[in-house]
Amino acid sequence: MTAASPPEVLRAPLVVEFPFTRSLGPVQGAFLTGLRESVVLGVKTSDGRVVVPPVEYDPVTSEEIRDLVEVAATGTVTTWAWNDRPRPNQPLGTPFAWALVKLDGADTALLHALDAPGPDAVRTGMRVRVRWAAERTGAITDIACFEPYEDAPDTPDTPDRPAAVNAAGPAPHDGVFEDAVTGIVAEARLDYVYSPGRAQTAYINALSERRTVGERCPSCHKVYVPPRGACPTCGVATTDRVEVGPAGTVTTFCIVNIKAKNLDIEVPYVYAHIALDGAGLALHGRIGGIPYDQVRMGLRVEPVWTDGGRYPDHYRPTGEPDADYDAYKELI
C-alpha cells in the first residue's frame, strides 16, 4: 500500500496594476512637451547647475525654480549596465544597456536605454545621441533610446536648434509650446506568478466544493480562516484542518460609495468583516440581499454561491436573531 501523494500546490499568473492620472505643472509639462518637439529641457538651480530631467524645487535651497534651459541631444555615458534579457514594455526588445547619459549642457545624468550590439561596444565616456521615436506624444518614451555617436559634428542633426545649444552650452527657453502637455497617465504594473502555498491551496480547493476550511493552531487552538500555514502568535505550524461556517456574524462593516473600475456592482454596497461560526478571526465579504442601510454589527449571514463560482459571491441574512455582542467582540 502506497501513501497518497500530497495535492499539488496552486500556481497562477497575477497582475497588479494601478494606473493613475497626474498633473504635471509648468516645469514637467514643459519638459515632456519639449520631448514631443525634439527639444530637451533642463532647469538651472540657484548655484548655476543644469538639472536634466528638470525638477521643480532646488535640491539645495528647496526653493521653487522655473529657469528653463535647452540642452543638446548629444551627451556622454557616465555609467551603464548591460540588460541581456529585456522584459515586456522596456524601451527595446533586443539586449541593450541601461545608461546614465549627461547631455551636453547638463550637469546631471538622464537614465535611458542605449542601443548597442553588445556589452563590448559600451564604455563609460562614450559619446551618444538621442534617437527620437517616430511618433511622439509628450512622454519620456519620445526618446526611443540613445545610440552611439562617436564622430560628433559641430552641430546636432536638428539644424533649427539654437547655436548656443549646438556650441557654447545650454540656451534659455521660455518653456512655451503650442498644445502643451498638462497631465499624464502613469502606468504602475507588476506581473508575476503567485503561489498561495500548501495551506491556502487547500482552502481554495475546499471553496470550489462550497466548503470553508481553516487550520487550528495546536498550541492556542485558534482557527485561522483563511489559513496561513502557521500561527503568527505561537509560531508553530497549523496542520489540523477544521471546516467552519457556513454561516457567520458581521463584526464590523463599511459602506462603499465609489464604484470600482471593472467591478459590476452598483453603489452603495456594504463590505464587511464576517466571523464564520467556528473561526478564530473574521474574513472579508460583501453583504447582499438587504438594503445597505440595514446592515449592522451582529447580523447573522450565510454565503451565496453563483453557478460555477469558486468562492461565495456575497453573504445574505440568514433570518436568525442578531448575535450578542459578547459573542463576537473579540473578533472585531
Image (cartoon, rainbow, N blue to C red):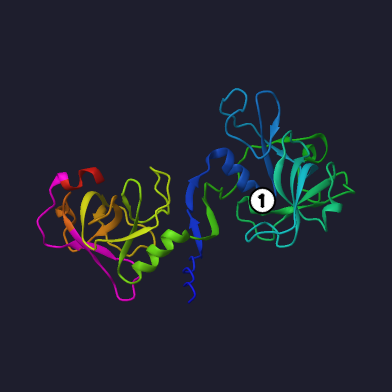
Residue 233, compared with residue 45, is above or below; it is: below
The secondary structure making up most of the magenta span is: loop
Residue 277: in magenta span = no
Residue at the image position 16 percent from the left and 57 percent from the top: 300
Which one is nearer the viewer's eye here, 238 or 151? Answer: 238
Residue at the image position 42 percent from the left and 48 percent from the top: 236
- What quarter of the picture does the C terminus occupy? top left
| Relative image position of residue 38 (x, y in whole percent) | 70, 50
Give the image quarter of residue 269.
bottom left
Return the residue at label 1: 37
Residue at the image position 87 percent from the left and 47 percent from the top: 152
Q: Amino acid at mark 1?
A: Glu
Residue 305: in magenta span = yes
| Relative image position of residue 81 (x, y in whole percent) | 75, 48
Which one is nearer the viewer's eye here, 329 or 133? Answer: 329
The residue stretch that appears in magenta: 301-326
